[in-house]
């Protein structure tokens, strides 16, 4: 049965979608069956795995707002399966406001898919809104990307407050799988200091593998590829493969 992992941080620009895309590709390469569900209206997860997000139908919009069976919205790529999103999801929270059990729409939709995959990743919007609540209520665990800059630390207390509220009120099963340090540059004191602070706060929840600043990793999305396919020898590619291995170890029953 799939481990359902939501990727979320209330601060944007921390590498959340990059991590979702490249973990999907890395775990697929390691022989796992992986589904990436995009509930971010920007739709970058599908694009990062080679899909034309505006031509993929049905998609997350149809699953969440029109009761389309989730299996019908799965689009296969050689890097893993995707339920893509696009700008149709903007304003979804308002549309869903009158839906019964509105926080659990995605959880219910994904239930039939859990036996088909080893991992289901959910790429969340940066804002804590109804789409994000749906992702966090559907998930077993939370993966938190944290950029190695001081501004990224400022939002961590808010993130933990949100996590505790959701765990207490909406999803008692939700746990923190781990924290991924992103955009890490070991040559700078700043990255080392931020990493030390995050480790002091989250202790053994911090993954051993930081994701480095890497040109090839930054270039890959413009080619609609995960970094493994764009440059499999790059530092970014190796880091995500190592991180995928660590996730397998942490989620092994």
Image (tube, rainbow, N blue to C red):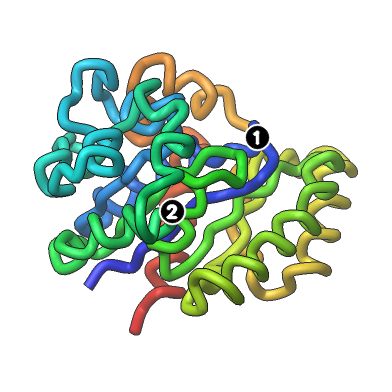
Q: Looking at the image, can residue 233 be seen?
A: no
The spot of residue 205 in percent (x, y) is 64, 71
The residue at 88%/51% (across/down) is 193
Above or below, comparing residue 90 to residue 208 in the picture:
above
Nearer the observer, 144 or 225:
144
Q: Examine the image and state in which quarter residue 10 appears.
A: top right
Nearer the observer, 41 or 231:
41
Is residue 161 toward the left or the right of residue 135 in the image? Answer: right
Nearer the observer, 64 or 227:
64
The spot of residue 17 in percent (x, y) is 48, 37
Judging by the rendered image, the residue that carries numbered circle 1 is 12
**Which label sits in the foreground, 1 or 2?**
2
Secondary-structure class at tag 1: loop
Q: Residue lying furthest front in this view? A: 98
Nearer the observer, 105 or 118:
105
The residue at 29%/43% (across/down) is 64
Is residue 151 toward the left or the right of residue 11 in the image? Answer: right
Dot placed on the residue nearer the N-terminal end, 1 or 2: 1
Q: Examine the image and state in which quarter residue 221 appears.
A: top left
The spot of residue 102 in percent (x, y) is 40, 54
The residue at 42%/60% (across/down) is 5
The residue at 67%/75% (across/down) is 204
Q: Which image quarter is the N terminus in?
A: bottom left
Which numbered disc covers residue 135? Answer: 2
The spot of residue 168 in percent (x, y) is 60, 76
């Amino acid at each position: 049965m799939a481990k359902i992992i939501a990727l979320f941080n209330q601060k944007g620009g921390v590498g959340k979608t990059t991590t979702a895309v490249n973990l999907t590709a890395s775990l697929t390469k390691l022989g796992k069956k992986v589904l990436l569900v995009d509930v971010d209206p920007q739709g970058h997860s599908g694009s990062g795995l080679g899909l034309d997000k505006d031509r993929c139908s049905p998609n997350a919009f149809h699953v969440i707002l029109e009761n389309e069976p989730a299996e019908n919205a799965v689009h296969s790529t050689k890097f893993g399966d995707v339920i893509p999103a696009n700008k149709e999801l903007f304003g979804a929270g308002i549309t869903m406001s009158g839906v019964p059990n509105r926080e659990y729409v995605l959880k219910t939709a994904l239930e039939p898919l859990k036996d088909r995959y080893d991992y289901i990743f959910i790429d969340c919007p940066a804002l804590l809104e109804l789409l994000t609540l749906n992702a966090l209520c559907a998930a077993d665990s939370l993966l938190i990307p944290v950029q190695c800059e001081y501004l990224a630390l400022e939002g961590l207390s808010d993130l933990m407050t949100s996590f505790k509220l959701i765990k207490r009120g909406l999803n008692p099963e939700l746990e923190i799988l781990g924290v991924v340090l992103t955009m890490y540059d070991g040559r700078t004191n700043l990255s080392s200091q931020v990493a030390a602070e995050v480790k002091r706060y989250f202790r053994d929840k911090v993954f051993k593998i930081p994701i480095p600043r890497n040109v090839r990793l930054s270039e890959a999305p413009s080619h609609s590829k995960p970094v493994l396919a764009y440059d499999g020898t790059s530092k970014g590619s190796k880091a995500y493969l190592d991180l995928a291995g660590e996730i397998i170890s942490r989620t092994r029953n």
